[in-house]
Image: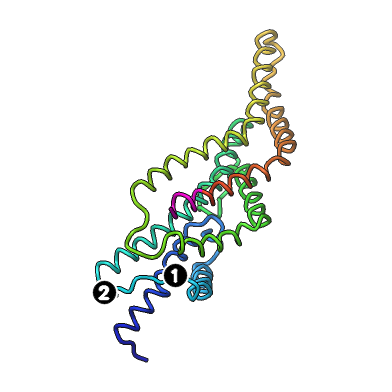
Amino acid sequence: MTFNSAELTALVAGFFWPFLRISALFISMPLFGTRLLPVRIRVLLAFSITLLIAPLLPDVPQVGVLTWQALLISIQQILIGLMMGFVMQLVFSILVLAGHQIASMMGLGFASMIDPQNGVSVPVISQFLLILGTLLFLVYGGHTVLITVIFESFTLLPVSVKGVDTGDFLQLVQWAGLIFKASLQIALPIIATLLTITLALGVITRAAPQLNIFSIGFPIGILSGYLILLLTLPALPSLFEGYVDAGFHFIRTVVLH
């Protein structure tokens, strides 16, 4: 099988560049980019979605394969996909950071395990919240919304030399401040409760040093933390759904402007 230059250019324009954007998104996504999902499966998913949506995509520029313009277009498609995936990675980082804050207040900072998504050690509370967030993402149909956003991206930001710029990265850094505010919103009930308990134990110890209250302060902090976490879990689904919606909104309005 042989291809002439026109056919090779059409193949690159119609399939290869969309495949680059979609595969870069799957590499950086917290759900599909996890180390538990083999690279071959990720490539197969990206290839399958590209085959499905390629005939429906708007016309892409016909440029030579071995030109600087083609190289710039390829780089832009990778950057767009990585940036879209990184936004959702920040959304899931809210749960990880909230778990760090909760575990530190409960005295469970030493109880950690390997996070399969990032390959680093995180507190058990963070891992619990991350697994819960992943399940909520699937229940809400986030994976189907993701495919819709991928398809919309080629209309909102067509394949061309122009793509993300320095202003987009600056807005992404500013938006990343959401993870600190949102993680504090999740962890604040437990932080406030444990801080109150610690102050109360301090006052009692100051008033009666011979009681040695801090010897029971550690188990009280753990039990209280678990109790407040249990009571606040019903509010987590609605909060996390709002964070996911905010992430998709940021992708549509900033990354794909």
- Looking at the picture, does residue 158 appear above or below residue 99? below
Q: Which residue is mark 2?
A: 66
User: How far from the left and from the top, in percent, is residue 71?
Assistant: 29, 67
Crowding near the residue tagged with mark 2, few <14, some 14–19, many ≥20 C-alpha atoms within 10 Å: few
Q: From the viewer's perspective, is the residue at label 2 or at label 1 nearer?
A: 1
Q: 149 or 116, which lies in front?
A: 149
What's under tag 1, amino acid-wise? Pro
Q: Assign the N terminus to one quadrant of the image.
A: bottom left
Q: 27 or 203, which lies in front?
A: 27
User: How far from the left and from the top, in percent, is residue 29?
Assistant: 51, 57
Q: Is residue 254 magenta?
A: yes
Query: What's the magenta region?
Result: 250-257
Q: Which residue is mark 1?
A: 58
Asked which quadrant contains residue 66, the reply is bottom left
- Looking at the picture, does residue 133 appear above or below residue 15? above
Label 2 to label 1: alpha-carbon separation: 23 Å
**Of the image marks 2 and 1, the number of the one nearer the N terminus:** 1
